[in-house]
Amino acid sequence: MKGNKTVSLCMIVKNEAKHLERCLSSVKDLVDEMIIVDTGSTDDTVEIAKSFDAKVFYYEWDNNFSNARNFSIQYASKDWILLMDGDDEFYYEDHDEFIQLINTSIKDGHYFKTQSFVGNMPGNDIVSNLNLRLLRNNKKYKFVGAIHEQITCVDNKMDYKNFSTEEIHIFHYGYLNDVVEEKNKRNRNISIIEEELKKDPKNHFHLFNLGNEYFAMGNKEKALDFFSLVYGELDFNDGFASKLVIRRIMCLDELGQYKRALNAIEEGLKIYPKFTDLELIRGWIYLKTKKYTIAIDSFNRCLDLGKPPSQLEFLNGCGTFRPYQALGEIYFEFEDFSKAFECFENVLKFNPSIQSPVYKIGAILNKIHDNKRYVSFKLSQYFNLEYVPNLLLISDVLITEGLYDLAMGYLEKAREIEENNYQVKFQINRTLFYQKKYFEAIKGFNELSSKGNEYKERLKYIFICGFITDLEYSKSVLDHIKEDNENYRYRVYHQLYNVFLGKNEAVLKKEDDDKSLNMIMKILEEVLKIQEFQLFEKLLYVLNYLESDRVLLELAQIYYKNGFKEMAVKEVLRSIKELDTIDYRGVEILYKEI
Protein backbone atom coordinates (compact mmCIF):
# COMPACT_ATOMS: atom_id res chain seq x y z
CA MET A 1 0.00 0.00 0.00
CA LYS A 2 1.30 3.45 -0.94
CA GLY A 3 0.74 6.71 0.87
CA ASN A 4 -0.77 9.62 -1.05
CA LYS A 5 0.07 11.91 1.85
CA THR A 6 3.62 12.61 2.98
CA VAL A 7 5.14 12.18 6.44
CA SER A 8 7.96 13.87 8.36
CA LEU A 9 9.52 11.86 11.17
CA CYS A 10 10.42 14.22 14.03
CA MET A 11 12.57 13.04 16.91
CA ILE A 12 14.67 14.42 19.75
CA VAL A 13 17.58 12.20 20.73
CA LYS A 14 20.60 11.96 22.97
CA ASN A 15 22.99 8.99 23.09
CA GLU A 16 20.63 6.56 21.35
CA ALA A 17 23.28 4.63 19.42
CA LYS A 18 22.14 1.30 20.87
CA HIS A 19 18.55 1.72 19.67
CA LEU A 20 18.39 4.30 16.88
CA GLU A 21 19.12 2.00 13.95
CA ARG A 22 16.26 -0.31 14.98
CA CYS A 23 13.94 2.68 15.33
CA LEU A 24 14.76 4.29 11.99
CA SER A 25 14.70 0.95 10.16
CA SER A 26 11.16 0.38 11.44
CA VAL A 27 9.84 3.60 9.84
CA LYS A 28 12.10 4.25 6.84
CA ASP A 29 9.44 2.95 4.43
CA LEU A 30 6.69 5.03 6.07
CA VAL A 31 8.24 8.50 6.08
CA ASP A 32 9.41 10.94 3.43
CA GLU A 33 11.90 12.84 5.57
CA MET A 34 13.60 12.35 8.92
CA ILE A 35 14.13 15.32 11.23
CA ILE A 36 16.52 14.37 14.04
CA VAL A 37 17.23 16.92 16.78
CA ASP A 38 20.25 15.99 18.87
CA THR A 39 20.52 17.44 22.37
CA GLY A 40 24.15 16.57 23.11
CA SER A 41 25.06 13.01 22.09
CA THR A 42 28.56 11.77 22.80
CA ASP A 43 28.17 8.39 21.07
CA ASP A 44 27.46 7.48 17.40
CA THR A 45 23.84 8.70 17.43
CA VAL A 46 24.38 11.48 14.87
CA GLU A 47 26.38 9.23 12.53
CA ILE A 48 23.62 6.60 12.60
CA ALA A 49 20.99 9.25 11.88
CA LYS A 50 22.97 10.57 8.91
CA SER A 51 23.34 7.05 7.52
CA PHE A 52 19.54 7.13 7.04
CA ASP A 53 19.83 10.50 5.23
CA ALA A 54 18.22 12.25 8.18
CA LYS A 55 18.34 16.01 8.51
CA VAL A 56 20.19 16.54 11.79
CA PHE A 57 19.75 19.68 13.86
CA TYR A 58 21.28 20.55 17.22
CA TYR A 59 19.52 21.87 20.28
CA GLU A 60 21.17 22.90 23.55
CA TRP A 61 19.36 20.90 26.23
CA ASP A 62 17.43 23.12 28.69
CA ASN A 63 15.63 20.44 30.75
CA ASN A 64 12.45 20.99 28.76
CA PHE A 65 11.15 18.28 26.43
CA SER A 66 8.42 20.51 24.96
CA ASN A 67 10.94 23.14 23.87
CA ALA A 68 13.02 20.50 22.12
CA ARG A 69 9.94 18.86 20.59
CA ASN A 70 8.67 22.21 19.26
CA PHE A 71 12.13 22.94 17.87
CA SER A 72 12.00 19.66 15.92
CA ILE A 73 8.53 20.04 14.38
CA GLN A 74 9.29 23.51 13.02
CA TYR A 75 11.51 21.84 10.40
CA ALA A 76 8.83 19.39 9.20
CA SER A 77 7.80 20.04 5.60
CA LYS A 78 5.38 17.16 4.90
CA ASP A 79 1.62 16.67 5.39
CA TRP A 80 1.90 14.73 8.62
CA ILE A 81 4.38 14.58 11.52
CA LEU A 82 5.23 11.19 13.04
CA LEU A 83 6.55 11.63 16.59
CA MET A 84 8.89 8.98 17.93
CA ASP A 85 11.76 8.54 20.38
CA GLY A 86 15.11 6.95 19.65
CA ASP A 87 14.32 3.87 21.71
CA ASP A 88 10.97 3.24 19.94
CA GLU A 89 10.14 0.69 17.26
CA PHE A 90 7.14 0.90 14.93
CA TYR A 91 5.27 -2.43 14.85
CA TYR A 92 5.71 -3.69 11.29
CA GLU A 93 2.28 -5.37 11.10
CA ASP A 94 0.63 -1.96 11.50
CA HIS A 95 2.32 -0.38 8.46
CA ASP A 96 -0.68 -0.75 6.14
CA GLU A 97 -3.07 0.60 8.75
CA PHE A 98 -0.80 3.61 9.23
CA ILE A 99 -0.70 4.35 5.49
CA GLN A 100 -4.46 4.05 5.23
CA LEU A 101 -4.79 6.43 8.20
CA ILE A 102 -2.65 9.21 6.71
CA ASN A 103 -4.46 8.89 3.38
CA THR A 104 -8.00 9.08 4.78
CA SER A 105 -7.93 10.86 8.16
CA ILE A 106 -9.86 14.10 8.64
CA LYS A 107 -8.51 14.52 12.19
CA ASP A 108 -5.66 16.73 13.32
CA GLY A 109 -3.95 14.10 15.43
CA HIS A 110 -3.92 10.47 16.44
CA TYR A 111 -2.89 8.63 19.59
CA PHE A 112 -1.18 5.27 19.12
CA LYS A 113 -0.61 2.53 21.70
CA THR A 114 2.87 2.68 23.19
CA GLN A 115 3.79 -0.73 24.55
CA SER A 116 6.73 -0.28 26.91
CA PHE A 117 8.89 -3.26 27.75
CA VAL A 118 9.78 -3.34 31.44
CA GLY A 119 12.10 -5.56 33.45
CA ASN A 120 15.42 -7.01 32.35
CA MET A 121 14.62 -7.82 28.72
CA PRO A 122 11.89 -7.38 26.10
CA GLY A 123 9.24 -10.00 26.64
CA ASN A 124 5.88 -10.50 28.29
CA ASP A 125 6.06 -7.66 30.81
CA ILE A 126 4.54 -4.81 28.84
CA VAL A 127 2.86 -1.64 30.05
CA SER A 128 0.49 0.13 27.64
CA ASN A 129 -0.08 3.87 27.30
CA LEU A 130 -1.67 6.13 24.72
CA ASN A 131 0.67 8.75 23.26
CA LEU A 132 0.21 11.32 20.54
CA ARG A 133 2.20 9.96 17.61
CA LEU A 134 0.69 11.48 14.47
CA LEU A 135 0.05 15.20 14.07
CA ARG A 136 -1.23 17.07 11.04
CA ASN A 137 1.41 19.60 9.98
CA ASN A 138 -0.89 22.64 9.92
CA LYS A 139 1.13 24.77 12.38
CA LYS A 140 -1.90 24.95 14.72
CA TYR A 141 -0.33 23.03 17.61
CA LYS A 142 2.57 23.13 20.03
CA PHE A 143 3.78 21.11 23.01
CA VAL A 144 3.70 22.34 26.59
CA GLY A 145 5.21 21.00 29.80
CA ALA A 146 8.86 20.43 30.59
CA ILE A 147 8.32 16.65 30.83
CA HIS A 148 5.61 14.25 29.65
CA GLU A 149 4.76 17.01 27.23
CA GLN A 150 1.14 17.58 26.16
CA ILE A 151 -0.29 18.95 22.92
CA THR A 152 -2.22 22.22 22.82
CA CYS A 153 -3.39 24.79 20.26
CA VAL A 154 -1.17 27.79 19.69
CA ASP A 155 -4.30 29.97 20.08
CA ASN A 156 -5.26 28.08 23.30
CA LYS A 157 -8.57 26.93 21.74
CA MET A 158 -7.99 23.19 22.10
CA ASP A 159 -10.67 20.81 20.80
CA TYR A 160 -9.88 17.13 21.48
CA LYS A 161 -12.64 16.10 19.08
CA ASN A 162 -10.01 16.69 16.42
CA PHE A 163 -7.99 13.79 17.86
CA SER A 164 -8.65 10.06 17.96
CA THR A 165 -7.11 6.83 19.21
CA GLU A 166 -5.89 4.11 16.84
CA GLU A 167 -4.95 0.45 17.24
CA ILE A 168 -1.46 1.13 15.94
CA HIS A 169 1.41 -0.01 18.13
CA ILE A 170 4.81 1.42 18.99
CA PHE A 171 7.21 -0.69 21.06
CA HIS A 172 9.27 1.29 23.57
CA TYR A 173 12.57 -0.03 24.99
CA GLY A 174 13.39 2.95 27.19
CA TYR A 175 12.03 1.52 30.44
CA LEU A 176 14.08 -1.68 30.44
CA ASN A 177 16.17 -1.78 33.60
CA ASP A 178 19.55 -1.42 31.92
CA VAL A 179 18.42 1.55 29.79
CA VAL A 180 16.90 3.38 32.77
CA GLU A 181 20.02 2.80 34.86
CA GLU A 182 22.44 3.75 32.09
CA LYS A 183 20.68 7.04 31.36
CA ASN A 184 19.85 7.82 35.00
CA LYS A 185 16.33 8.56 33.77
CA ARG A 186 14.60 8.48 37.12
CA ASN A 187 16.73 11.13 38.81
CA ARG A 188 16.65 13.27 35.67
CA ASN A 189 12.85 13.07 35.49
CA ILE A 190 12.38 13.74 39.21
CA SER A 191 14.51 16.89 39.07
CA ILE A 192 12.52 18.24 36.10
CA ILE A 193 9.15 17.44 37.71
CA GLU A 194 10.19 19.04 40.99
CA GLU A 195 11.12 22.23 39.13
CA GLU A 196 7.68 22.21 37.48
CA LEU A 197 5.99 21.73 40.86
CA LYS A 198 7.77 24.80 42.23
CA LYS A 199 5.78 26.79 39.66
CA ASP A 200 2.51 24.91 40.26
CA PRO A 201 2.66 22.90 43.54
CA LYS A 202 -0.84 21.41 43.23
CA ASN A 203 -0.62 20.31 39.61
CA HIS A 204 -2.19 16.84 39.61
CA PHE A 205 -0.46 15.69 36.44
CA HIS A 206 3.01 16.53 37.79
CA LEU A 207 2.24 14.92 41.17
CA PHE A 208 1.03 11.80 39.39
CA ASN A 209 4.21 11.64 37.30
CA LEU A 210 6.37 12.15 40.38
CA GLY A 211 4.58 9.20 41.98
CA ASN A 212 5.31 7.15 38.85
CA GLU A 213 9.03 7.85 39.15
CA TYR A 214 9.15 6.71 42.78
CA PHE A 215 7.04 3.66 41.88
CA ALA A 216 9.54 2.70 39.18
CA MET A 217 12.42 3.16 41.64
CA GLY A 218 10.75 0.71 44.04
CA ASN A 219 9.79 3.31 46.65
CA LYS A 220 6.15 2.26 46.84
CA GLU A 221 5.47 4.13 50.11
CA LYS A 222 6.48 7.47 48.64
CA ALA A 223 4.69 6.72 45.36
CA LEU A 224 1.51 5.92 47.28
CA ASP A 225 1.72 9.26 49.10
CA PHE A 226 1.72 11.16 45.81
CA PHE A 227 -0.97 8.99 44.21
CA SER A 228 -3.24 9.31 47.24
CA LEU A 229 -2.71 13.09 47.36
CA VAL A 230 -4.09 13.37 43.82
CA TYR A 231 -6.72 10.63 44.20
CA GLY A 232 -8.66 12.59 46.82
CA GLU A 233 -9.31 15.40 44.33
CA LEU A 234 -9.14 13.42 41.08
CA ASP A 235 -11.26 14.33 38.07
CA PHE A 236 -11.89 10.90 36.56
CA ASN A 237 -12.25 12.49 33.12
CA ASP A 238 -8.57 13.45 33.14
CA GLY A 239 -6.56 11.51 30.59
CA PHE A 240 -4.21 10.10 33.24
CA ALA A 241 -6.94 9.28 35.80
CA SER A 242 -7.26 5.55 35.05
CA LYS A 243 -3.48 5.14 35.18
CA LEU A 244 -3.38 6.81 38.59
CA VAL A 245 -6.17 4.53 39.83
CA ILE A 246 -4.30 1.36 38.87
CA ARG A 247 -0.89 2.60 40.02
CA ARG A 248 -2.32 3.44 43.44
CA ILE A 249 -3.89 -0.04 43.67
CA MET A 250 -0.61 -1.66 42.66
CA CYS A 251 1.16 0.24 45.44
CA LEU A 252 -1.40 -0.93 48.01
CA ASP A 253 -1.07 -4.50 46.73
CA GLU A 254 2.74 -4.55 46.83
CA LEU A 255 2.75 -2.99 50.29
CA GLY A 256 0.48 -5.79 51.53
CA GLN A 257 -2.43 -3.43 52.22
CA TYR A 258 -4.86 -5.89 50.66
CA LYS A 259 -8.07 -4.63 52.26
CA ARG A 260 -7.44 -1.08 51.04
CA ALA A 261 -6.46 -2.41 47.63
CA LEU A 262 -9.67 -4.43 47.31
CA ASN A 263 -11.74 -1.41 48.33
CA ALA A 264 -9.91 0.72 45.75
CA ILE A 265 -10.54 -1.93 43.08
CA GLU A 266 -14.26 -1.90 43.91
CA GLU A 267 -14.30 1.91 43.60
CA GLY A 268 -12.31 1.77 40.37
CA LEU A 269 -14.63 -0.75 38.72
CA LYS A 270 -17.66 1.42 39.52
CA ILE A 271 -16.03 4.25 37.57
CA TYR A 272 -14.44 2.06 34.87
CA PRO A 273 -16.56 -1.13 34.68
CA LYS A 274 -14.58 -2.46 31.69
CA PHE A 275 -11.17 -1.99 33.33
CA THR A 276 -10.11 -5.66 33.16
CA ASP A 277 -6.71 -4.90 34.68
CA LEU A 278 -8.35 -4.09 38.03
CA GLU A 279 -10.23 -7.39 38.07
CA LEU A 280 -6.99 -9.22 37.34
CA ILE A 281 -5.24 -7.56 40.30
CA ARG A 282 -8.22 -8.50 42.49
CA GLY A 283 -7.74 -12.12 41.41
CA TRP A 284 -4.02 -11.94 42.21
CA ILE A 285 -4.77 -10.60 45.71
CA TYR A 286 -7.26 -13.40 46.36
CA LEU A 287 -4.68 -15.89 45.10
CA LYS A 288 -1.97 -14.51 47.40
CA THR A 289 -4.34 -14.67 50.36
CA LYS A 290 -5.30 -18.30 49.55
CA LYS A 291 -8.92 -17.45 48.67
CA TYR A 292 -8.83 -19.78 45.72
CA THR A 293 -12.55 -20.02 44.94
CA ILE A 294 -13.11 -16.29 44.61
CA ALA A 295 -9.74 -15.94 42.85
CA ILE A 296 -11.06 -18.34 40.19
CA ASP A 297 -14.23 -16.22 39.94
CA SER A 298 -12.15 -13.07 39.39
CA PHE A 299 -9.97 -14.62 36.71
CA ASN A 300 -13.05 -15.96 34.89
CA ARG A 301 -14.55 -12.46 35.03
CA CYS A 302 -11.38 -11.19 33.36
CA LEU A 303 -11.98 -13.63 30.51
CA ASP A 304 -15.61 -12.50 30.26
CA LEU A 305 -14.58 -8.83 30.19
CA GLY A 306 -11.86 -9.46 27.62
CA LYS A 307 -9.47 -6.80 26.44
CA PRO A 308 -10.23 -3.40 28.00
CA PRO A 309 -10.74 -0.29 25.87
CA SER A 310 -7.47 1.26 24.65
CA GLN A 311 -7.97 4.26 26.94
CA LEU A 312 -7.90 1.95 29.98
CA GLU A 313 -5.48 -0.84 29.07
CA PHE A 314 -2.35 -0.83 31.22
CA LEU A 315 -1.02 -4.41 31.49
CA ASN A 316 -1.05 -6.50 28.34
CA GLY A 317 -3.10 -9.70 28.25
CA CYS A 318 -5.41 -8.98 31.21
CA GLY A 319 -8.39 -10.44 29.37
CA THR A 320 -6.53 -13.32 27.75
CA PHE A 321 -3.28 -15.06 28.65
CA ARG A 322 -2.74 -13.61 32.15
CA PRO A 323 -6.00 -14.94 33.71
CA TYR A 324 -5.52 -18.26 31.90
CA GLN A 325 -2.01 -18.46 33.35
CA ALA A 326 -3.30 -17.81 36.88
CA LEU A 327 -6.15 -20.31 36.51
CA GLY A 328 -3.71 -22.91 35.20
CA GLU A 329 -1.46 -22.44 38.24
CA ILE A 330 -4.42 -22.87 40.61
CA TYR A 331 -5.72 -26.01 38.90
CA PHE A 332 -2.18 -27.42 38.71
CA GLU A 333 -1.71 -26.79 42.43
CA PHE A 334 -4.87 -28.76 43.21
CA GLU A 335 -3.92 -31.49 40.71
CA ASP A 336 -6.86 -30.84 38.40
CA PHE A 337 -4.54 -31.53 35.52
CA SER A 338 -7.21 -31.61 32.83
CA LYS A 339 -8.34 -28.03 33.54
CA ALA A 340 -4.76 -26.87 34.11
CA PHE A 341 -3.70 -28.31 30.74
CA GLU A 342 -6.56 -26.53 28.97
CA CYS A 343 -5.63 -23.21 30.61
CA PHE A 344 -1.94 -23.45 29.75
CA GLU A 345 -2.81 -24.31 26.14
CA ASN A 346 -4.91 -21.15 26.03
CA VAL A 347 -1.96 -19.13 27.34
CA LEU A 348 0.07 -20.34 24.37
CA LYS A 349 -2.83 -19.64 22.02
CA PHE A 350 -2.97 -15.98 23.06
CA ASN A 351 0.76 -15.50 23.64
CA PRO A 352 2.90 -18.08 21.81
CA SER A 353 6.12 -16.36 22.91
CA ILE A 354 5.66 -17.09 26.63
CA GLN A 355 7.64 -20.16 27.72
CA SER A 356 6.51 -20.94 31.28
CA PRO A 357 3.28 -22.73 30.20
CA VAL A 358 5.36 -25.12 28.08
CA TYR A 359 7.13 -26.31 31.25
CA LYS A 360 3.79 -26.78 33.01
CA ILE A 361 2.39 -28.68 30.04
CA GLY A 362 5.49 -30.88 30.10
CA ALA A 363 5.04 -31.50 33.84
CA ILE A 364 1.35 -32.42 33.38
CA LEU A 365 2.08 -34.78 30.48
CA ASN A 366 4.87 -36.41 32.50
CA LYS A 367 2.54 -36.92 35.48
CA ILE A 368 -0.38 -38.43 33.57
CA HIS A 369 1.39 -40.55 30.93
CA ASP A 370 3.57 -43.56 31.64
CA ASN A 371 4.74 -43.64 28.03
CA LYS A 372 7.41 -40.96 28.08
CA ARG A 373 7.83 -41.02 24.31
CA TYR A 374 4.24 -39.86 24.10
CA VAL A 375 5.14 -36.98 26.42
CA SER A 376 7.89 -36.00 23.99
CA PHE A 377 5.60 -36.40 20.97
CA LYS A 378 2.84 -34.21 22.48
CA LEU A 379 5.32 -31.48 23.33
CA SER A 380 6.73 -31.52 19.81
CA GLN A 381 3.29 -30.77 18.34
CA TYR A 382 3.42 -27.20 19.64
CA PHE A 383 6.53 -26.28 17.67
CA ASN A 384 8.24 -26.03 14.33
CA LEU A 385 11.00 -28.61 14.75
CA GLU A 386 13.23 -27.03 12.12
CA TYR A 387 13.85 -24.02 14.37
CA VAL A 388 16.76 -24.47 16.78
CA PRO A 389 15.38 -22.28 19.65
CA ASN A 390 12.27 -24.49 19.67
CA LEU A 391 14.38 -27.63 19.90
CA LEU A 392 16.36 -26.09 22.76
CA LEU A 393 13.13 -25.23 24.60
CA ILE A 394 11.67 -28.73 24.21
CA SER A 395 14.94 -30.28 25.36
CA ASP A 396 15.01 -28.04 28.44
CA VAL A 397 11.44 -28.99 29.34
CA LEU A 398 12.36 -32.69 29.04
CA ILE A 399 15.53 -32.15 31.11
CA THR A 400 13.42 -30.44 33.79
CA GLU A 401 11.24 -33.56 33.85
CA GLY A 402 14.27 -35.86 34.07
CA LEU A 403 13.74 -37.31 30.57
CA TYR A 404 17.33 -36.96 29.51
CA ASP A 405 17.49 -39.53 26.70
CA LEU A 406 14.50 -37.93 24.97
CA ALA A 407 16.00 -34.46 25.44
CA MET A 408 19.20 -35.64 23.76
CA GLY A 409 17.24 -36.64 20.66
CA TYR A 410 16.08 -33.04 20.11
CA LEU A 411 19.56 -31.74 20.80
CA GLU A 412 21.10 -34.04 18.23
CA LYS A 413 18.59 -32.74 15.69
CA ALA A 414 19.47 -29.16 16.66
CA ARG A 415 23.17 -29.95 16.16
CA GLU A 416 22.42 -31.29 12.67
CA ILE A 417 20.76 -27.97 11.79
CA GLU A 418 23.38 -25.70 13.41
CA GLU A 419 26.57 -27.63 14.03
CA ASN A 420 28.43 -24.80 15.77
CA ASN A 421 25.60 -23.37 17.86
CA TYR A 422 27.11 -22.65 21.29
CA GLN A 423 23.84 -23.06 23.19
CA VAL A 424 23.17 -26.43 21.57
CA LYS A 425 26.63 -27.66 22.51
CA PHE A 426 26.22 -26.37 26.05
CA GLN A 427 22.84 -28.08 26.43
CA ILE A 428 24.20 -31.36 25.11
CA ASN A 429 27.00 -31.31 27.71
CA ARG A 430 24.54 -30.36 30.43
CA THR A 431 22.40 -33.37 29.46
CA LEU A 432 25.46 -35.64 29.57
CA PHE A 433 26.04 -34.37 33.10
CA TYR A 434 22.49 -35.34 34.15
CA GLN A 435 22.97 -38.72 32.49
CA LYS A 436 26.01 -39.14 34.76
CA LYS A 437 28.34 -39.33 31.78
CA TYR A 438 30.75 -37.11 33.66
CA PHE A 439 33.94 -37.55 31.65
CA GLU A 440 32.07 -36.89 28.37
CA ALA A 441 30.49 -33.80 29.92
CA ILE A 442 33.86 -32.49 31.13
CA LYS A 443 35.42 -33.06 27.72
CA GLY A 444 32.54 -31.29 25.99
CA PHE A 445 32.48 -28.34 28.38
CA ASN A 446 36.24 -27.88 28.05
CA GLU A 447 35.91 -27.70 24.27
CA LEU A 448 33.51 -24.77 24.50
CA SER A 449 34.70 -21.20 24.08
CA SER A 450 35.15 -19.25 27.29
CA LYS A 451 33.32 -16.29 25.74
CA GLY A 452 29.81 -17.73 25.75
CA ASN A 453 27.04 -16.56 28.06
CA GLU A 454 27.06 -19.97 29.72
CA TYR A 455 30.74 -19.71 30.68
CA LYS A 456 30.14 -19.49 34.43
CA GLU A 457 27.56 -22.25 34.24
CA ARG A 458 29.90 -24.64 32.47
CA LEU A 459 32.55 -24.04 35.14
CA LYS A 460 29.95 -24.97 37.75
CA TYR A 461 29.28 -28.33 36.07
CA ILE A 462 32.99 -29.11 35.62
CA PHE A 463 33.55 -28.21 39.28
CA ILE A 464 30.91 -30.71 40.41
CA CYS A 465 32.15 -33.39 37.99
CA GLY A 466 35.64 -33.02 39.44
CA PHE A 467 34.39 -33.97 42.92
CA ILE A 468 32.96 -37.18 41.43
CA THR A 469 35.73 -38.14 38.99
CA ASP A 470 39.06 -36.37 39.39
CA LEU A 471 39.62 -33.54 41.87
CA GLU A 472 42.10 -31.91 39.49
CA TYR A 473 39.16 -30.72 37.38
CA SER A 474 37.66 -28.94 40.42
CA LYS A 475 41.03 -27.43 41.21
CA SER A 476 41.40 -26.12 37.64
CA VAL A 477 37.98 -24.43 37.88
CA LEU A 478 39.05 -22.80 41.13
CA ASP A 479 42.16 -21.45 39.38
CA HIS A 480 40.05 -20.11 36.47
CA ILE A 481 37.71 -18.25 38.81
CA LYS A 482 40.64 -16.79 40.73
CA GLU A 483 42.03 -15.39 37.48
CA ASP A 484 38.66 -13.75 36.71
CA ASN A 485 38.98 -11.60 39.85
CA GLU A 486 35.43 -12.37 41.03
CA ASN A 487 36.38 -12.43 44.67
CA TYR A 488 33.14 -13.52 46.34
CA ARG A 489 32.55 -16.22 43.70
CA TYR A 490 36.06 -17.51 44.21
CA ARG A 491 35.45 -17.62 47.96
CA VAL A 492 32.28 -19.68 47.46
CA TYR A 493 34.00 -22.25 45.28
CA HIS A 494 37.08 -22.27 47.53
CA GLN A 495 34.89 -22.91 50.59
CA LEU A 496 33.16 -25.83 48.86
CA TYR A 497 36.56 -27.19 47.83
CA ASN A 498 37.81 -26.96 51.42
CA VAL A 499 34.68 -28.68 52.74
CA PHE A 500 35.13 -31.51 50.25
CA LEU A 501 38.73 -31.95 51.43
CA GLY A 502 37.61 -31.86 55.06
CA LYS A 503 39.52 -28.65 55.78
CA ASN A 504 38.00 -26.69 58.67
CA GLU A 505 39.04 -23.31 57.26
CA ALA A 506 36.61 -20.38 56.78
CA VAL A 507 37.00 -18.52 53.48
CA LEU A 508 33.62 -16.83 53.14
CA LYS A 509 33.07 -13.35 54.51
CA LYS A 510 29.98 -12.11 56.33
CA GLU A 511 29.21 -9.60 53.57
CA ASP A 512 29.08 -12.54 51.13
CA ASP A 513 26.18 -14.24 52.88
CA ASP A 514 23.22 -13.47 50.61
CA LYS A 515 25.04 -13.89 47.28
CA SER A 516 26.94 -16.89 48.58
CA LEU A 517 23.79 -18.60 49.83
CA ASN A 518 22.12 -18.34 46.41
CA MET A 519 25.20 -19.63 44.61
CA ILE A 520 25.75 -22.49 47.05
CA MET A 521 22.11 -23.59 46.81
CA LYS A 522 22.32 -23.73 43.02
CA ILE A 523 25.37 -25.99 43.24
CA LEU A 524 23.79 -28.20 45.93
CA GLU A 525 20.61 -28.52 43.86
CA GLU A 526 22.57 -29.73 40.84
CA VAL A 527 24.24 -32.39 43.01
CA LEU A 528 20.85 -33.43 44.39
CA LYS A 529 19.33 -33.66 40.88
CA ILE A 530 21.99 -36.17 39.79
CA GLN A 531 21.37 -38.09 43.04
CA GLU A 532 24.98 -38.09 44.15
CA PHE A 533 23.80 -38.30 47.74
CA GLN A 534 27.16 -38.92 49.42
CA LEU A 535 28.63 -35.86 47.73
CA PHE A 536 25.54 -33.86 48.66
CA GLU A 537 25.83 -34.80 52.34
CA LYS A 538 29.51 -33.93 52.32
CA LEU A 539 29.02 -30.51 50.71
CA LEU A 540 26.13 -29.65 53.05
CA TYR A 541 28.71 -28.77 55.69
CA VAL A 542 29.42 -25.59 53.72
CA LEU A 543 26.22 -24.16 55.22
CA ASN A 544 27.97 -24.01 58.61
CA TYR A 545 30.07 -21.15 57.23
CA LEU A 546 27.02 -18.99 56.48
CA GLU A 547 25.36 -16.75 59.06
CA SER A 548 22.15 -16.15 57.09
CA ASP A 549 18.90 -17.03 58.87
CA ARG A 550 17.50 -18.14 55.47
CA VAL A 551 19.81 -21.17 55.21
CA LEU A 552 17.37 -23.87 56.31
CA LEU A 553 14.42 -22.39 54.40
CA GLU A 554 16.44 -22.30 51.18
CA LEU A 555 17.56 -25.88 51.80
CA ALA A 556 13.91 -26.86 52.32
CA GLN A 557 13.06 -25.35 48.96
CA ILE A 558 15.57 -27.42 47.00
CA TYR A 559 14.45 -30.56 48.83
CA TYR A 560 10.82 -29.81 48.02
CA LYS A 561 11.49 -28.89 44.40
CA ASN A 562 13.26 -32.21 43.84
CA GLY A 563 10.64 -34.39 45.47
CA PHE A 564 12.14 -34.87 48.95
CA LYS A 565 9.07 -33.58 50.76
CA GLU A 566 9.71 -35.09 54.19
CA MET A 567 13.18 -33.58 54.27
CA ALA A 568 11.71 -30.23 53.24
CA VAL A 569 9.22 -30.28 56.12
CA LYS A 570 12.01 -31.23 58.53
CA GLU A 571 14.15 -28.24 57.45
CA VAL A 572 11.24 -25.78 57.72
CA LEU A 573 10.53 -26.99 61.26
CA ARG A 574 14.24 -26.72 62.12
CA SER A 575 14.26 -23.17 60.78
CA ILE A 576 11.38 -22.26 63.08
CA LYS A 577 12.90 -23.98 66.12
CA GLU A 578 16.59 -23.11 65.71
CA LEU A 579 16.56 -19.82 63.78
CA ASP A 580 13.09 -18.51 64.65
CA THR A 581 12.57 -17.86 60.93
CA ILE A 582 9.76 -18.72 58.53
CA ASP A 583 8.60 -17.29 55.20
CA TYR A 584 5.52 -17.76 53.01
CA ARG A 585 7.20 -20.55 51.01
CA GLY A 586 7.94 -22.46 54.21
CA VAL A 587 4.35 -21.96 55.34
CA GLU A 588 3.14 -23.38 52.02
CA ILE A 589 5.29 -26.50 52.47
CA LEU A 590 3.85 -27.09 55.94
CA TYR A 591 0.32 -26.35 54.73
CA LYS A 592 0.56 -28.89 51.89
CA GLU A 593 2.46 -31.65 53.68
CA ILE A 594 1.27 -31.68 57.30
Image (cartoon, helix red, strand yellow):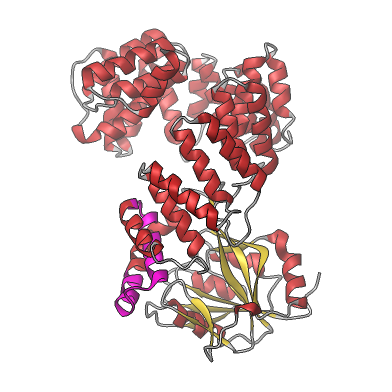
Q: Is residue 515 above or below residue 61?
A: above
Q: Looking at the image, which residue is at 59% across and 42% down? A: 322
Q: Looking at the image, which residue is at 32% across and 70% down? A: 191
Taken as a whole, is the magenta stretch helix, strand or loop? helix
Q: Is residue 347 left or right of residue 240?
A: right
Q: Looking at the image, which residue is at 30% across and 15% down? A: 573
* Residue most extreme to the bottom: 155
Q: Quadrant of the N terminus?
A: bottom right
Q: Is residue 488 left or right of residue 434?
A: left
Q: Quadrant of the C terminus?
A: top left
* Residue most extreme to the right: 1
Q: Is residue 146 above or below residue 174?
A: below
* Residue most extreme to the top: 534
Residue 18 in view (yes/no)? no
Q: Is residue 228 above or below residue 121?
A: below
Q: Looking at the image, which residue is at 71% across and 70% down? A: 29
| x and y, in percent, of residue 109 in the image | 64, 77
Q: Is residue 12 above or below residue 232?
A: below
Q: Is residue 578 left or right of residue 224?
A: left
Magenta-span inclusion, residue 202: yes
| x and y, in percent, of residue 159 in the image | 60, 82
Residue 215 in view (yes/no)? yes
| x and y, in percent, of residue 179 in the image | 44, 58
Quadrant in which residue 107 is drawn: bottom right
The boundaries of the magenta stretch are: 191-220
| x and y, in percent, of residue 466 in the image | 40, 18
Magenta-span inclusion, residue 138: no
Quadrant in which residue 359 is drawn: top right
**Nearer to me, 146 or 247:** 247
**Nearer to me, 320 or 538:** 320
